[in-house]
Amino acid sequence: MVSAVHPGALLIAGALLIPFLRGSVKQAYLLLLTAGAFLAAISLPEGVYWTVESGFLGHDLVFGKVDRLSLVFGYIFTLMAFIGTLFGIHMKDDGEKVVSLIYAGSSIGAVFAGDMLTLFIFLEVMALTATYLVWARKTAASYLAGLRYFTVHAIGGLLFLAGLIMHSYETGSIAFGLIGLDSLASYLILLGFGVNCAFPLLHAWLPDAYPESTILGTIFLSIFTTKTAVYLLARAFPGTEELIYIGAVMTAFPIFYAVIENNMNRVLCYSLINQVGFMVVGIGIGTELAVNGAVAHAFTNILFEGLLFLCMGAVYHQTGRINATDMGGLYKTMPLTAFFCIIGAASISGFPLFSGFVTKSMIVSASAHEGLAIIWFTLLFAAAGVFHHAGIKIPFFAFFSHDSGLRPKEPPVNMLIAMGIAAFLSVFIGVYPSSLYSILPYPVDYVPYTGAHVMAQTQLLFFSALAFTLLMLAGIYPAEMRAINIDADWFYRRGAACFMWLLRNTFTRFGEAVSRFAFATVPGAAILLSRNPVAALKIAGDTLAASFSSEPRRTVIKSRISHEKAIYPGDIIKHWPIGATMLWIAIFLVAYLLLYYI
Protein backbone atom coordinates (compact mmCIF):
# COMPACT_ATOMS: atom_id res chain seq x y z
CA MET A 1 0.00 0.00 0.00
CA VAL A 2 1.24 3.45 -0.91
CA SER A 3 -0.02 4.79 2.44
CA ALA A 4 2.49 2.56 4.23
CA VAL A 5 5.42 4.22 2.48
CA HIS A 6 7.26 7.16 3.98
CA PRO A 7 7.44 9.73 1.13
CA GLY A 8 10.81 11.01 2.29
CA ALA A 9 12.28 7.52 2.59
CA LEU A 10 10.93 6.73 -0.88
CA LEU A 11 12.80 9.70 -2.36
CA ILE A 12 16.03 8.94 -0.49
CA ALA A 13 16.06 5.24 -1.34
CA GLY A 14 14.87 5.81 -4.89
CA ALA A 15 17.55 8.42 -5.56
CA LEU A 16 20.28 5.82 -5.06
CA LEU A 17 19.17 3.95 -8.19
CA ILE A 18 19.49 6.95 -10.52
CA PRO A 19 23.17 6.37 -11.50
CA PHE A 20 22.28 2.87 -12.77
CA LEU A 21 19.69 4.08 -15.26
CA ARG A 22 20.12 5.68 -18.66
CA GLY A 23 18.27 7.85 -21.17
CA SER A 24 14.49 7.98 -21.29
CA VAL A 25 14.21 5.15 -18.73
CA LYS A 26 15.96 7.34 -16.17
CA GLN A 27 13.77 10.32 -16.99
CA ALA A 28 10.59 8.26 -16.65
CA TYR A 29 11.89 6.77 -13.40
CA LEU A 30 12.57 10.24 -11.93
CA LEU A 31 9.06 11.41 -12.69
CA LEU A 32 7.46 8.22 -11.37
CA LEU A 33 9.59 8.37 -8.22
CA THR A 34 8.63 11.94 -7.33
CA ALA A 35 5.01 11.41 -8.35
CA GLY A 36 4.96 8.30 -6.16
CA ALA A 37 6.27 10.36 -3.23
CA PHE A 38 3.46 12.87 -3.76
CA LEU A 39 0.86 10.06 -3.87
CA ALA A 40 2.38 8.56 -0.72
CA ALA A 41 2.07 11.93 1.04
CA ILE A 42 -1.56 12.55 0.09
CA SER A 43 -2.44 8.97 1.08
CA LEU A 44 -1.12 9.29 4.63
CA PRO A 45 -3.81 9.30 7.33
CA GLU A 46 -3.15 11.12 10.56
CA GLY A 47 -1.40 9.16 13.27
CA VAL A 48 2.01 8.02 14.48
CA TYR A 49 3.98 5.61 12.28
CA TRP A 50 7.40 4.03 11.86
CA THR A 51 8.54 3.98 15.49
CA VAL A 52 11.94 2.35 16.00
CA GLU A 53 13.51 1.29 19.30
CA SER A 54 16.83 3.11 19.32
CA GLY A 55 18.25 2.30 22.72
CA PHE A 56 19.36 5.91 22.96
CA LEU A 57 18.80 6.72 26.65
CA GLY A 58 15.65 4.63 26.47
CA HIS A 59 14.02 6.80 23.81
CA ASP A 60 12.38 5.54 20.62
CA LEU A 61 12.80 7.18 17.22
CA VAL A 62 9.54 8.25 15.58
CA PHE A 63 9.80 8.72 11.83
CA GLY A 64 6.13 9.42 11.22
CA LYS A 65 4.17 11.93 13.27
CA VAL A 66 1.41 12.77 10.83
CA ASP A 67 -1.15 15.48 11.56
CA ARG A 68 -2.72 18.34 9.66
CA LEU A 69 0.28 20.62 10.20
CA SER A 70 2.90 18.17 8.93
CA LEU A 71 0.67 17.00 6.09
CA VAL A 72 0.42 20.50 4.56
CA PHE A 73 4.20 20.67 4.31
CA GLY A 74 4.39 17.06 3.16
CA TYR A 75 2.01 17.80 0.28
CA ILE A 76 3.82 20.88 -0.98
CA PHE A 77 7.32 19.42 -0.51
CA THR A 78 6.56 16.31 -2.53
CA LEU A 79 4.73 18.36 -5.17
CA MET A 80 7.67 20.72 -5.59
CA ALA A 81 10.09 17.78 -5.69
CA PHE A 82 8.11 16.60 -8.72
CA ILE A 83 8.05 20.06 -10.34
CA GLY A 84 11.75 20.66 -9.70
CA THR A 85 12.67 17.24 -11.05
CA LEU A 86 10.56 17.82 -14.17
CA PHE A 87 12.24 21.20 -14.68
CA GLY A 88 15.74 19.73 -14.62
CA ILE A 89 15.06 16.27 -16.02
CA HIS A 90 17.15 16.90 -19.15
CA MET A 91 20.23 17.97 -17.20
CA LYS A 92 23.13 15.53 -17.26
CA ASP A 93 24.62 15.64 -13.77
CA ASP A 94 23.43 12.45 -12.01
CA GLY A 95 25.14 13.40 -8.76
CA GLU A 96 23.14 16.59 -8.58
CA LYS A 97 19.87 14.71 -9.18
CA VAL A 98 20.68 12.11 -6.53
CA VAL A 99 21.60 14.70 -3.92
CA SER A 100 18.63 16.93 -4.78
CA LEU A 101 16.20 14.11 -4.06
CA ILE A 102 18.02 13.07 -0.87
CA TYR A 103 17.87 16.71 0.22
CA ALA A 104 14.13 16.84 -0.54
CA GLY A 105 13.55 13.48 1.16
CA SER A 106 15.41 14.66 4.27
CA SER A 107 13.24 17.79 4.43
CA ILE A 108 10.14 15.60 4.29
CA GLY A 109 11.70 13.36 6.94
CA ALA A 110 12.19 16.42 9.19
CA VAL A 111 8.56 17.44 8.70
CA PHE A 112 7.26 14.02 9.76
CA ALA A 113 9.81 13.48 12.57
CA GLY A 114 8.12 12.76 15.88
CA ASP A 115 11.18 13.20 18.09
CA MET A 116 14.06 15.64 18.19
CA LEU A 117 16.82 13.09 17.63
CA THR A 118 15.25 11.96 14.35
CA LEU A 119 14.72 15.61 13.49
CA PHE A 120 18.39 16.39 14.20
CA ILE A 121 19.54 13.56 11.93
CA PHE A 122 17.40 14.75 9.02
CA LEU A 123 18.43 18.39 9.51
CA GLU A 124 22.10 17.41 9.37
CA VAL A 125 21.54 15.39 6.20
CA MET A 126 19.84 18.47 4.77
CA ALA A 127 22.87 20.62 5.65
CA LEU A 128 25.31 18.18 4.02
CA THR A 129 23.29 17.69 0.84
CA ALA A 130 22.58 21.41 0.50
CA THR A 131 26.30 22.08 0.76
CA TYR A 132 26.89 19.61 -2.06
CA LEU A 133 24.29 21.41 -4.17
CA VAL A 134 26.12 24.70 -3.67
CA TRP A 135 29.40 23.04 -4.63
CA ALA A 136 27.82 21.36 -7.67
CA ARG A 137 28.51 24.43 -9.79
CA LYS A 138 32.22 23.65 -9.35
CA THR A 139 33.51 27.22 -9.29
CA ALA A 140 35.82 28.87 -6.78
CA ALA A 141 33.01 31.16 -5.66
CA SER A 142 30.61 28.24 -5.13
CA TYR A 143 33.28 26.34 -3.19
CA LEU A 144 33.80 29.22 -0.76
CA ALA A 145 30.06 29.91 -0.51
CA GLY A 146 29.49 26.21 0.25
CA LEU A 147 32.08 26.31 3.01
CA ARG A 148 30.41 29.32 4.57
CA TYR A 149 26.99 27.67 4.21
CA PHE A 150 28.18 24.50 5.91
CA THR A 151 29.93 26.40 8.71
CA VAL A 152 26.85 28.46 9.53
CA HIS A 153 24.53 25.44 9.46
CA ALA A 154 26.96 23.33 11.48
CA ILE A 155 26.83 25.99 14.18
CA GLY A 156 23.03 25.98 13.94
CA GLY A 157 23.04 22.19 14.26
CA LEU A 158 25.26 22.36 17.35
CA LEU A 159 22.95 24.92 18.96
CA PHE A 160 19.99 22.64 18.32
CA LEU A 161 21.85 19.59 19.61
CA ALA A 162 22.85 21.39 22.82
CA GLY A 163 19.26 22.51 23.31
CA LEU A 164 18.03 18.98 22.59
CA ILE A 165 20.28 17.44 25.23
CA MET A 166 19.36 20.03 27.85
CA HIS A 167 15.66 19.76 27.02
CA SER A 168 15.68 15.96 27.26
CA TYR A 169 17.51 16.20 30.61
CA GLU A 170 14.97 18.69 31.96
CA THR A 171 11.83 16.93 30.71
CA GLY A 172 12.94 13.32 30.35
CA SER A 173 11.59 13.26 26.79
CA ILE A 174 12.86 13.92 23.28
CA ALA A 175 9.37 14.08 21.75
CA PHE A 176 9.07 16.96 19.31
CA GLY A 177 6.07 19.17 19.96
CA LEU A 178 5.22 22.44 21.64
CA ILE A 179 8.33 23.75 23.43
CA GLY A 180 7.76 27.43 24.15
CA LEU A 181 10.41 29.91 25.15
CA ASP A 182 10.99 29.41 28.88
CA SER A 183 14.48 27.96 29.41
CA LEU A 184 18.03 28.08 28.10
CA ALA A 185 17.37 24.85 26.20
CA SER A 186 14.41 26.40 24.41
CA TYR A 187 16.47 29.46 23.44
CA LEU A 188 19.19 27.24 21.99
CA ILE A 189 16.64 25.24 20.01
CA LEU A 190 15.03 28.44 18.74
CA LEU A 191 18.41 29.77 17.63
CA GLY A 192 19.16 26.50 15.88
CA PHE A 193 15.90 26.78 13.96
CA GLY A 194 16.53 30.49 13.43
CA VAL A 195 19.69 29.80 11.46
CA ASN A 196 17.71 27.71 8.97
CA CYS A 197 14.93 30.28 8.98
CA ALA A 198 17.36 33.12 8.13
CA PHE A 199 16.66 35.26 11.18
CA PRO A 200 18.10 38.79 10.93
CA LEU A 201 21.92 38.77 11.23
CA LEU A 202 21.81 34.99 10.72
CA HIS A 203 20.44 35.34 7.19
CA ALA A 204 23.49 36.19 5.09
CA TRP A 205 24.15 32.56 4.13
CA LEU A 206 21.01 32.58 1.99
CA PRO A 207 21.81 35.30 -0.60
CA ASP A 208 25.46 34.24 -0.35
CA ALA A 209 25.05 30.53 -1.16
CA TYR A 210 21.90 30.03 -3.23
CA PRO A 211 22.91 32.16 -6.26
CA GLU A 212 26.27 30.35 -6.41
CA SER A 213 24.64 26.96 -6.94
CA THR A 214 23.59 25.44 -10.25
CA ILE A 215 20.22 26.18 -11.85
CA LEU A 216 18.64 23.02 -10.42
CA GLY A 217 20.44 23.40 -7.10
CA THR A 218 19.21 26.98 -6.62
CA ILE A 219 15.62 25.90 -7.28
CA PHE A 220 15.73 23.02 -4.80
CA LEU A 221 17.51 25.08 -2.16
CA SER A 222 14.91 27.84 -2.41
CA ILE A 223 12.12 25.38 -1.61
CA PHE A 224 13.12 23.35 1.40
CA THR A 225 15.49 24.73 4.05
CA THR A 226 13.66 27.90 5.10
CA LYS A 227 10.20 26.33 4.81
CA THR A 228 11.27 23.37 6.93
CA ALA A 229 12.35 25.89 9.56
CA VAL A 230 8.95 27.60 9.30
CA TYR A 231 7.29 24.25 9.99
CA LEU A 232 9.56 23.67 13.01
CA LEU A 233 8.70 27.08 14.45
CA ALA A 234 5.00 26.47 13.87
CA ARG A 235 5.30 23.13 15.67
CA ALA A 236 7.47 24.20 18.60
CA PHE A 237 7.01 27.94 19.14
CA PRO A 238 3.51 29.12 18.14
CA GLY A 239 2.50 32.20 20.09
CA THR A 240 6.08 33.15 21.00
CA GLU A 241 5.93 36.94 21.12
CA GLU A 242 9.60 37.43 20.22
CA LEU A 243 8.91 35.90 16.82
CA ILE A 244 6.51 38.72 15.99
CA TYR A 245 9.29 41.29 16.13
CA ILE A 246 11.89 39.03 14.53
CA GLY A 247 9.51 38.35 11.66
CA ALA A 248 8.64 42.02 11.27
CA VAL A 249 12.32 42.88 10.87
CA MET A 250 12.66 40.06 8.35
CA THR A 251 9.85 41.48 6.24
CA ALA A 252 11.34 44.98 6.12
CA PHE A 253 15.13 45.01 5.82
CA PRO A 254 15.52 42.71 2.75
CA ILE A 255 13.54 45.18 0.67
CA PHE A 256 16.42 47.65 0.60
CA TYR A 257 18.94 44.99 -0.40
CA ALA A 258 16.63 43.61 -3.09
CA VAL A 259 16.13 47.04 -4.65
CA ILE A 260 19.85 47.68 -5.13
CA GLU A 261 20.83 44.09 -6.03
CA ASN A 262 21.80 43.37 -9.63
CA ASN A 263 21.83 39.55 -9.54
CA MET A 264 18.23 38.40 -10.10
CA ASN A 265 18.64 35.21 -8.07
CA ARG A 266 20.00 37.27 -5.20
CA VAL A 267 16.99 39.60 -5.49
CA LEU A 268 14.76 36.54 -5.11
CA CYS A 269 16.79 35.38 -2.11
CA TYR A 270 16.11 38.66 -0.31
CA SER A 271 12.49 38.35 -1.38
CA LEU A 272 12.48 34.86 0.15
CA ILE A 273 13.64 36.25 3.51
CA ASN A 274 10.95 38.91 3.28
CA GLN A 275 8.23 36.31 2.67
CA VAL A 276 9.46 34.01 5.44
CA GLY A 277 9.25 37.06 7.72
CA PHE A 278 5.48 37.18 7.14
CA MET A 279 5.24 33.52 8.20
CA VAL A 280 7.35 34.09 11.31
CA VAL A 281 5.10 36.98 12.33
CA GLY A 282 2.04 34.74 11.94
CA ILE A 283 3.60 32.00 14.07
CA GLY A 284 4.56 34.55 16.70
CA ILE A 285 1.02 35.90 16.93
CA GLY A 286 -0.08 32.33 17.44
CA THR A 287 -3.86 32.60 16.98
CA GLU A 288 -5.61 30.08 14.77
CA LEU A 289 -6.00 32.66 12.01
CA ALA A 290 -2.35 33.69 12.24
CA VAL A 291 -0.95 30.13 12.27
CA ASN A 292 -3.28 29.15 9.43
CA GLY A 293 -2.05 32.23 7.55
CA ALA A 294 1.61 31.35 8.15
CA VAL A 295 1.14 27.76 6.98
CA ALA A 296 -0.99 28.77 4.00
CA HIS A 297 1.51 31.44 2.99
CA ALA A 298 4.34 28.92 3.24
CA PHE A 299 2.39 26.65 0.90
CA THR A 300 1.68 29.32 -1.73
CA ASN A 301 5.08 30.97 -1.37
CA ILE A 302 6.79 27.69 -2.23
CA LEU A 303 4.73 27.70 -5.41
CA PHE A 304 5.06 31.31 -6.58
CA GLU A 305 8.56 31.97 -5.25
CA GLY A 306 9.56 28.64 -6.76
CA LEU A 307 7.95 29.76 -10.01
CA LEU A 308 10.06 32.93 -10.04
CA PHE A 309 13.22 30.88 -9.41
CA LEU A 310 12.15 28.54 -12.22
CA CYS A 311 11.71 31.50 -14.58
CA MET A 312 15.10 32.97 -13.71
CA GLY A 313 16.60 29.50 -14.03
CA ALA A 314 15.10 29.21 -17.52
CA VAL A 315 16.47 32.62 -18.47
CA TYR A 316 19.93 31.71 -17.20
CA HIS A 317 19.72 28.34 -18.98
CA GLN A 318 18.95 30.05 -22.28
CA THR A 319 21.14 33.16 -22.05
CA GLY A 320 23.88 32.43 -19.53
CA ARG A 321 23.03 35.78 -17.93
CA ILE A 322 21.51 36.43 -14.51
CA ASN A 323 22.30 40.11 -13.87
CA ALA A 324 19.67 42.75 -14.56
CA THR A 325 22.25 44.85 -16.39
CA ASP A 326 22.70 42.05 -18.96
CA MET A 327 19.04 41.34 -19.64
CA GLY A 328 16.01 43.12 -21.03
CA GLY A 329 13.77 42.67 -24.05
CA LEU A 330 13.58 38.89 -23.62
CA TYR A 331 9.79 38.89 -23.93
CA LYS A 332 10.22 39.06 -27.70
CA THR A 333 11.56 35.53 -27.94
CA MET A 334 10.55 34.09 -24.55
CA PRO A 335 6.90 35.15 -24.24
CA LEU A 336 5.74 32.06 -22.35
CA THR A 337 8.50 32.36 -19.78
CA ALA A 338 7.69 36.07 -19.40
CA PHE A 339 4.01 35.19 -18.96
CA PHE A 340 4.76 32.65 -16.22
CA CYS A 341 7.10 35.14 -14.54
CA ILE A 342 4.36 37.76 -14.48
CA ILE A 343 2.02 35.25 -12.82
CA GLY A 344 4.63 34.57 -10.18
CA ALA A 345 5.20 38.30 -9.71
CA ALA A 346 1.48 38.97 -9.39
CA SER A 347 1.13 36.15 -6.86
CA ILE A 348 3.99 37.27 -4.64
CA SER A 349 2.71 40.86 -4.79
CA GLY A 350 -0.73 39.79 -3.59
CA PHE A 351 -2.87 40.80 -6.56
CA PRO A 352 -6.51 39.69 -6.22
CA LEU A 353 -7.17 36.33 -7.90
CA PHE A 354 -3.59 35.23 -7.24
CA SER A 355 -2.49 32.99 -4.40
CA GLY A 356 -0.51 35.54 -2.39
CA PHE A 357 -3.65 37.63 -1.96
CA VAL A 358 -5.56 34.91 -0.12
CA THR A 359 -2.73 33.85 2.23
CA LYS A 360 -0.62 36.88 3.06
CA SER A 361 -3.75 38.82 3.99
CA MET A 362 -4.58 36.24 6.70
CA ILE A 363 -1.39 37.20 8.57
CA VAL A 364 -1.93 40.94 8.09
CA SER A 365 -5.54 40.59 9.30
CA ALA A 366 -4.42 38.56 12.32
CA SER A 367 -2.03 41.35 13.33
CA ALA A 368 -4.90 43.84 13.07
CA HIS A 369 -7.21 41.62 15.12
CA GLU A 370 -4.61 41.50 17.90
CA GLY A 371 -4.20 45.28 17.90
CA LEU A 372 -0.56 45.18 16.75
CA ALA A 373 -0.65 48.50 14.94
CA ILE A 374 3.10 48.90 14.35
CA ILE A 375 3.41 45.32 13.14
CA TRP A 376 0.40 45.80 10.87
CA PHE A 377 1.95 48.94 9.37
CA THR A 378 5.30 47.17 8.93
CA LEU A 379 3.61 44.31 7.08
CA LEU A 380 1.85 46.76 4.75
CA PHE A 381 5.15 48.51 4.07
CA ALA A 382 6.78 45.13 3.41
CA ALA A 383 3.93 44.11 1.08
CA ALA A 384 4.46 47.28 -0.95
CA GLY A 385 8.20 46.62 -0.99
CA VAL A 386 7.66 43.09 -2.30
CA PHE A 387 5.72 44.52 -5.20
CA HIS A 388 8.64 46.83 -5.95
CA HIS A 389 11.48 44.33 -5.98
CA ALA A 390 9.76 41.06 -6.93
CA GLY A 391 6.51 42.12 -8.58
CA ILE A 392 8.00 44.77 -10.81
CA LYS A 393 11.77 44.52 -10.81
CA ILE A 394 12.10 40.84 -11.71
CA PRO A 395 9.84 40.75 -14.80
CA PHE A 396 10.59 44.36 -15.82
CA PHE A 397 14.38 44.14 -15.92
CA ALA A 398 14.47 40.56 -17.22
CA PHE A 399 11.91 40.72 -20.00
CA PHE A 400 11.22 44.41 -20.73
CA SER A 401 13.28 47.48 -19.77
CA HIS A 402 16.06 48.20 -22.28
CA ASP A 403 16.62 45.82 -25.19
CA SER A 404 19.74 43.81 -24.41
CA GLY A 405 19.85 42.48 -27.97
CA LEU A 406 19.60 38.90 -26.70
CA ARG A 407 17.22 36.69 -28.72
CA PRO A 408 17.17 33.32 -26.94
CA LYS A 409 14.57 30.67 -27.66
CA GLU A 410 12.05 29.44 -25.14
CA PRO A 411 13.51 26.83 -22.76
CA PRO A 412 12.90 23.09 -23.32
CA VAL A 413 9.33 21.81 -23.05
CA ASN A 414 9.88 20.14 -19.68
CA MET A 415 10.91 23.50 -18.21
CA LEU A 416 7.83 25.19 -19.66
CA ILE A 417 5.53 22.47 -18.28
CA ALA A 418 7.11 22.76 -14.82
CA MET A 419 6.62 26.53 -14.86
CA GLY A 420 3.10 26.06 -16.20
CA ILE A 421 2.10 23.74 -13.33
CA ALA A 422 3.39 26.18 -10.70
CA ALA A 423 1.69 29.10 -12.47
CA PHE A 424 -1.61 27.23 -12.78
CA LEU A 425 -1.65 26.35 -9.07
CA SER A 426 -0.77 29.95 -8.12
CA VAL A 427 -3.85 31.16 -10.00
CA PHE A 428 -6.07 28.24 -8.99
CA ILE A 429 -5.51 28.81 -5.27
CA GLY A 430 -6.06 32.54 -5.75
CA VAL A 431 -9.41 31.91 -7.42
CA TYR A 432 -10.47 28.95 -5.19
CA PRO A 433 -8.80 29.57 -1.82
CA SER A 434 -11.07 27.04 -0.13
CA SER A 435 -9.04 24.28 -1.82
CA LEU A 436 -6.10 25.33 0.34
CA TYR A 437 -8.05 26.43 3.39
CA SER A 438 -9.56 22.95 3.70
CA ILE A 439 -6.19 21.33 4.48
CA LEU A 440 -4.89 23.91 7.00
CA PRO A 441 -4.26 22.93 10.66
CA TYR A 442 -7.30 24.78 12.05
CA PRO A 443 -10.82 25.38 10.68
CA VAL A 444 -10.81 28.52 8.57
CA ASP A 445 -13.29 31.30 9.16
CA TYR A 446 -11.79 33.88 6.85
CA VAL A 447 -13.13 35.49 3.68
CA PRO A 448 -10.40 37.15 1.61
CA TYR A 449 -12.64 38.58 -1.10
CA THR A 450 -14.42 41.39 0.68
CA GLY A 451 -14.90 44.76 -0.96
CA ALA A 452 -12.76 46.51 1.66
CA HIS A 453 -9.89 44.05 1.38
CA VAL A 454 -9.83 44.03 -2.42
CA MET A 455 -9.99 47.82 -2.55
CA ALA A 456 -7.28 48.30 0.09
CA GLN A 457 -4.90 45.86 -1.57
CA THR A 458 -5.54 47.32 -5.01
CA GLN A 459 -4.81 50.82 -3.73
CA LEU A 460 -1.62 49.62 -2.05
CA LEU A 461 -0.39 48.01 -5.27
CA PHE A 462 -1.48 50.95 -7.41
CA PHE A 463 0.41 53.51 -5.33
CA SER A 464 3.45 51.23 -5.19
CA ALA A 465 3.44 51.03 -8.99
CA LEU A 466 2.99 54.78 -9.18
CA ALA A 467 5.96 55.32 -6.86
CA PHE A 468 8.12 53.00 -8.98
CA THR A 469 7.10 54.83 -12.17
CA LEU A 470 7.79 58.27 -10.73
CA LEU A 471 11.16 57.18 -9.34
CA MET A 472 12.12 55.74 -12.74
CA LEU A 473 11.00 58.85 -14.63
CA ALA A 474 12.81 61.10 -12.17
CA GLY A 475 15.94 59.01 -12.58
CA ILE A 476 16.37 58.47 -8.83
CA TYR A 477 15.44 54.79 -8.71
CA PRO A 478 18.62 52.92 -7.70
CA ALA A 479 20.39 52.08 -10.95
CA GLU A 480 21.25 48.47 -11.71
CA MET A 481 25.01 48.18 -11.57
CA ARG A 482 27.70 45.59 -11.03
CA ALA A 483 28.60 45.94 -7.39
CA ILE A 484 29.07 43.95 -4.20
CA ASN A 485 26.51 44.85 -1.56
CA ILE A 486 27.75 44.46 1.99
CA ASP A 487 25.45 42.41 4.20
CA ALA A 488 25.71 40.88 7.67
CA ASP A 489 28.12 38.30 6.30
CA TRP A 490 30.72 41.10 6.27
CA PHE A 491 31.08 40.61 10.01
CA TYR A 492 31.87 36.91 9.94
CA ARG A 493 33.89 37.14 6.73
CA ARG A 494 36.00 39.98 8.14
CA GLY A 495 35.72 38.58 11.64
CA ALA A 496 37.06 35.22 10.49
CA ALA A 497 39.88 36.93 8.57
CA CYS A 498 40.72 39.02 11.65
CA PHE A 499 40.67 35.93 13.85
CA MET A 500 42.98 34.08 11.47
CA TRP A 501 45.33 37.11 11.40
CA LEU A 502 45.39 37.09 15.19
CA LEU A 503 46.12 33.37 15.16
CA ARG A 504 48.91 33.75 12.63
CA ASN A 505 50.48 36.87 14.16
CA THR A 506 49.68 38.00 17.68
CA PHE A 507 48.72 34.64 19.16
CA THR A 508 51.51 32.85 17.34
CA ARG A 509 54.10 35.35 18.56
CA PHE A 510 52.73 35.17 22.08
CA GLY A 511 52.89 31.38 21.95
CA GLU A 512 56.43 31.50 20.65
CA ALA A 513 57.42 33.89 23.45
CA VAL A 514 55.85 31.65 26.08
CA SER A 515 57.52 28.61 24.53
CA ARG A 516 60.87 30.37 24.39
CA PHE A 517 60.58 31.46 28.04
CA ALA A 518 59.42 28.03 29.26
CA PHE A 519 61.72 25.83 27.23
CA ALA A 520 64.77 28.03 26.61
CA THR A 521 65.08 30.95 29.01
CA VAL A 522 64.14 29.17 32.24
CA PRO A 523 66.19 25.99 31.59
CA GLY A 524 69.12 28.11 30.38
CA ALA A 525 69.01 30.24 33.52
CA ALA A 526 68.82 27.12 35.68
CA ILE A 527 71.85 25.63 33.94
CA LEU A 528 73.75 28.87 34.29
CA LEU A 529 72.81 29.12 37.96
CA SER A 530 73.83 25.53 38.65
CA ARG A 531 77.38 26.19 37.42
CA ASN A 532 78.12 28.39 40.44
CA PRO A 533 75.08 29.17 42.59
CA VAL A 534 77.09 31.24 45.08
CA ALA A 535 78.57 33.46 42.37
CA ALA A 536 75.20 33.78 40.62
CA LEU A 537 73.49 34.81 43.85
CA LYS A 538 76.29 37.27 44.53
CA ILE A 539 75.81 38.85 41.08
CA ALA A 540 72.06 39.03 41.71
CA GLY A 541 72.62 40.58 45.13
CA ASP A 542 75.06 43.12 43.75
CA THR A 543 72.64 44.01 40.98
CA LEU A 544 69.88 44.57 43.53
CA ALA A 545 72.23 46.59 45.74
CA ALA A 546 73.25 48.76 42.79
CA SER A 547 69.63 49.76 42.31
CA PHE A 548 69.44 51.32 45.76
CA SER A 549 72.94 52.79 46.02
CA SER A 550 74.20 56.32 45.47
CA GLU A 551 75.77 57.17 42.16
CA PRO A 552 79.45 56.83 43.24
CA ARG A 553 78.73 53.57 45.08
CA ARG A 554 76.66 52.29 42.10
CA THR A 555 79.62 52.85 39.79
CA VAL A 556 81.82 50.75 42.03
CA ILE A 557 79.22 47.96 42.26
CA LYS A 558 78.69 47.92 38.51
CA SER A 559 82.41 47.57 37.99
CA ARG A 560 82.45 44.65 40.38
CA ILE A 561 79.44 43.06 38.64
CA SER A 562 81.19 43.35 35.29
CA HIS A 563 84.22 41.60 36.75
CA GLU A 564 82.07 38.87 38.32
CA LYS A 565 80.30 38.23 35.02
CA ALA A 566 83.56 38.17 33.12
CA ILE A 567 85.03 35.41 35.32
CA TYR A 568 81.71 33.55 35.84
CA PRO A 569 81.41 30.70 36.78
CA GLY A 570 85.05 30.93 37.89
CA ASP A 571 86.65 28.30 40.13
CA ILE A 572 83.67 26.48 41.61
CA ILE A 573 85.86 24.25 43.86
CA LYS A 574 86.29 25.70 47.31
CA HIS A 575 89.89 25.34 48.54
CA TRP A 576 90.10 24.86 52.30
CA PRO A 577 93.36 24.96 54.36
CA ILE A 578 94.36 21.52 55.79
CA GLY A 579 94.47 22.79 59.37
CA ALA A 580 91.00 24.27 59.21
CA THR A 581 89.69 21.09 57.64
CA MET A 582 91.13 18.93 60.40
CA LEU A 583 89.70 21.31 62.99
CA TRP A 584 86.16 20.98 61.55
CA ILE A 585 86.50 17.17 61.43
CA ALA A 586 87.52 17.10 65.09
CA ILE A 587 84.57 19.33 66.05
CA PHE A 588 82.12 17.06 64.22
CA LEU A 589 83.55 13.92 65.91
CA VAL A 590 83.35 15.44 69.39
CA ALA A 591 79.77 16.56 68.74
CA TYR A 592 78.88 13.10 67.52
CA LEU A 593 80.39 11.41 70.63
CA LEU A 594 78.58 13.78 72.95
CA LEU A 595 75.26 13.11 71.26
CA TYR A 596 75.89 9.37 71.29
CA TYR A 597 76.62 9.11 75.03
CA ILE A 598 74.10 11.66 76.33
Image (cartoon, helix red, strand yellow):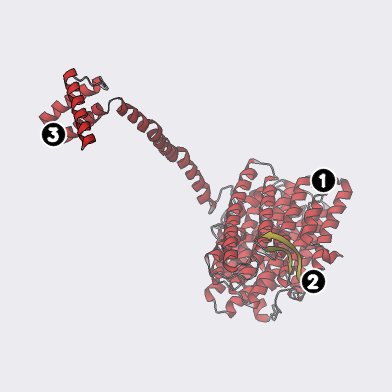
Q: Earlier in the sequence, mark 2 or mark 1?
A: 1
Callout 1–callout 3 Cβ contact below 8 Å? no
Reading the image, the residue beneath label 2 is 45
Mark 1 or mark 3, which has the lower sequence index?
1
Marks 2 and 3, the one that precedes in the sequence: 2
At 83% across and 65% down in the image, what residue appears?
4
- Nearest the camera: 171 or 291? 171
* Residue 326 point in image, percent of width and height: 66, 48
Mark 1 Cα shell of 10 Å, populated few (<14), some (14-19), many (≥20): few
The C terminus sits in image quarter? top left
How many neighbours does mark 2 have within 10 angstroms: few (below 14), some (14-19), or many (20 or more)? some
Q: Is residue 12 visible?
A: yes
Residue holding disc 3: 549
In front here: 158 or 149?
158
Circle on res. 510: none
Q: CA distance from mark 2 to mark 3?
A: 96 Å
The foreground one among 134 and 315 is: 134
| Residue 342 visible in the current orientation | no
Horizontally, residue 251 falls left or right of residue 40, namely: left
